Image (cartoon, rainbow, N blue to C red):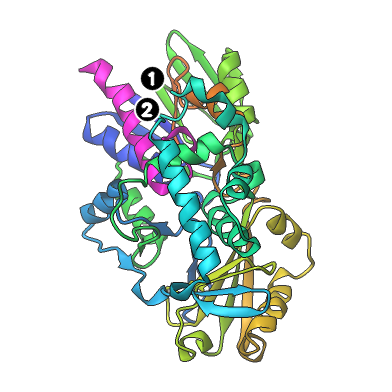
Amino acid sequence: MKVAIVGLGIAGLRAAMLLEASGATVELYEARGRPGGRLHTIDEGGGAIYEAGGEWIDSDHNRVLSLLSEFNLEPDPKSNHWPGRVVYRGKSISEDSLWSDAMEDDLRVEAAAKEMCRELKLPAWDNPQHKELDERTLEHFLREHTQSERGLWWVTSRYRSDEGDDPENISLLGWLSMYKLYVDRDGDVMSAFRFPGGARSLCESMLGKIQGQAHFGKVLRKVHQDPLGVTLTFDGGVTTKVDKAILTLPPPALERVVFEPALSVQKRCAVEACRMSRAIKIVWQFKEAWWRDQGWGGGMHCDGPLQQTWDGGLGEAPILTAYVCGREAAEWVRLGDPVRAGVFELAKIYPEAAKTFERGWVHNWIGDSFAHGAFSSLAPGYVLEFMQHIGVHEGNVHFAGEHTANWAGFIEGALESAERVHAELIEPQA
């Protein structure tokens, strides 16, 4: 069986590895000039190495951890990043000493979420009796279960970061279905690890293990199916004929592909309805790691426009990363120089930032020409009407990527989808 895989993010790379191990022949195609997709480690020189894209691994994301172990890689713990700082209305405290009203509201939200999760099934779309939850927003839920202004800000800041967009744009059912995956966790396992040396090293190792040839700079334009197989056409008229195809492209990229015959109405509507989160990263290099000298790890939640920071350095250079989501992210990318504007905002809280700033970079996933967003986002009304159709194959064309998984939005979900399409192709042959 000859299979073409379009999109060499971690879902496509993993699918290729699994298929070759099962005896299939694979061809690899990628629009970018590198593997990894939205996993993107950048080396700017001078020891400035950081993640421009996906970065964190939860301690129970077993697919990711297992994949690392296949390459004899140990995940990098975040022990030096916690506790972070919390800054609200000019007051700064340690995250492990959170204001009592904010902590109580946080606990109320968690208790309410756990109680509601008891009635839910997985996958998320298997809850047709909860249409009202799908149409409600996460913002409404947070307001309903908080009693203080500071507590509402705190939980909004936390969950906006997780979802990559403002809570008003997130389906409550979608959020609860993701929360259900966390209910039985022990301790603090969120964002427990990072990729040793950066995600790029893993993606390059995966590519090196695949025998099939990789073709970069290939933008998919048309998918034609007939009784003899699948023909893919890329920019410049380059074509290939295969038995099966796996498309790992994010939904906005799929929208630009011509399908012959056309996608089913359900599939087309699901692709068009699947939103992408609005998230950017602003990265600064400093002369010295002034935050470490002050006794904290660089992690911060604030009520200003920077929203969240952490120590993002993977090399020797002192690096801080700001992670900004939602409306605020869209505002940042309209600025002429987000890097220096960000230093200005950071210096309002920590004057050392302006004194020691050297250079910086911004990575605008909203404006990324291939992804048009950081990761998939479950908008109100999406889960019950569209989500179940986003990953279903159409004839000999199969679909993977984090947006097709239960672990939507996570690297773990991308690997989950790779396992699913592998089973779809191989099990019928058994």
Q: How many marks?
A: 2
Q: Does the magenta portion include 422? A: yes
Rendered image quadrant of residue 14: top left
Q: Under tag 1, what secondary structure?
A: loop
Secondary structure that dominates the magenta span: helix
User: Which residue is painted at 54% across and 46% down in the image?
Assistant: 375
Mark seen at residue 3: 2
User: Which residue is painted at 36% across and 41% down in the image?
Assistant: 415
x, y percentage for residue 87? 60, 74
x, y percentage for residue 348? 70, 82
Amino acid carrying mark 1 in the image: Asp
Amino acid carrying mark 2 in the image: Val
Rendered image quadrant of residue 189: bottom left
Asked if 146 appears above or below 131 in the picture, the reply is below
Q: Nearer the viewer, residue 139 or 79?
A: 139
Give the magenta-colored segment's residue range.
403-430
User: Which residue is painted at 60% across and 46% down in the image?
Assistant: 144
